[in-house]
Image (tube, helix red, strand yellow):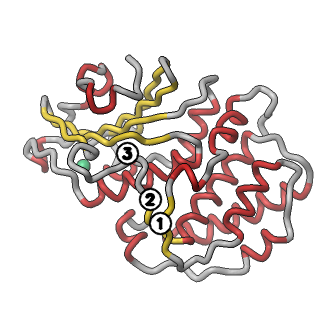
Amino acid sequence: MSLPTSCIAVDILSIEEIKAISTKKYEQAVLVFGSGSNKLKVLCGDNCQETWAIMPPLNVLIQWLSQTKICFQEAIVVHNHPQVPWHGEIIPSDNDIVSTEFLKWQLALLGITLTDHTIISGDKKQSLAEINLYRHNSPLKVSGFEIKRFIYCFLVQASVVVETTGSVLEELIDALEKNLDRIRPYYENSHCCRIFKTKPVDDKFTKKLLTLGTSDPVINKLINFFIDLDDGKRFKIKPDKVIPYGLELQKKFISATYKLR
Ligand SMILES: [Zn+2]
């Protein structure tokens, strides 16, 4: 089964791994990635909280992608609503909707389009796209700070699989890791809280980035992209316009020419 046309038309419950979670007593999400005729799935957690299950950490996504030799372009996410507390209801929660936008973001960084998010319960299913609660190509409504955070994560994770090019990149990675530590408590809040509540105070991290550079043009593009971002500014931008070189980065992850740090 190929994914790109199957996201809405095909009965997703015919996918074995998705059928398996439809009657589980706890919430679980399945991500299915597609590339032409190829498809692969990944299960995100056995007994984890809903939002985590729908939006696995970026490092989990990248670790998984770096282990495969396929460059993916599309993905769908499916999660189940158990009888308790949902009583078979497949109505998307606010967190479901917000989490989908975040996942869209994360996958956009990797050059992957999230085509839909479907909720299942037993034999019932509800696609967010079908009821206009999700559009894969709609502008992302995020703040500059959120964008920065995603790219911080991305660069830190990229540093694990992208060959380092000297002390400058090492310094950048150290700075990124420190900054991630600083904002981690803030990100322990739910996705809804992150969007609607306050952000941590910024330090001079962006200025530090200005002094850094690498010989890797793709990494340089990423750095330049967020140097200009205003933390508090609200953005509406199309996913494919945000990180148009996401596929290049994904190729780096699956390329044998890049080695582990
Ligand atoms: Zn849900």
- At mark 1, the secondary structure is strand
Q: Amino acid at mark 3?
A: Ala
Q: Are marks 2 and 1 in contact (CB under 8 Å)?
A: yes
Tell whether circle 3 marks a residue whose Cβ is less than 8 angstroms from ligand 1: no
> Upstream in the sequence, badge 2 or badge 1?
2
What residue do we see at 26% from left, 27% from top? 9
Mark linked to residue 139? 2
Q: Dividing the picture into quarters, in which one does residue 227 lie?
A: bottom right
Q: Nearer the viewer, residue 246 or 154?
A: 246
Along the polypeptide, which appears first: circle 1 or circle 3? 3
Q: How many marks?
A: 3
How far across and down, in percent of the image, does residue 243 sit?
61, 52
| SS at badge 2 | loop
How crowded pointer 3 is (Cα within 10 Å; few <14, some 14-19, many 20+) is rated as: many
Tell me the residue that label 1 is attached to: 236
Residue at the extreme right:
166
- The answer to whether any part of residue 19 appears in the image is no
Query: Mark 1 belongs to which amino acid?
Result: Lys
> Circle 3 sits on which residue?
53
Compared across the picture, whether 246 is left or right of 165 comes to: left
Query: Which label sits in the foreground, 1 or 3?
Result: 1
- Residue 231 quadrant: bottom right
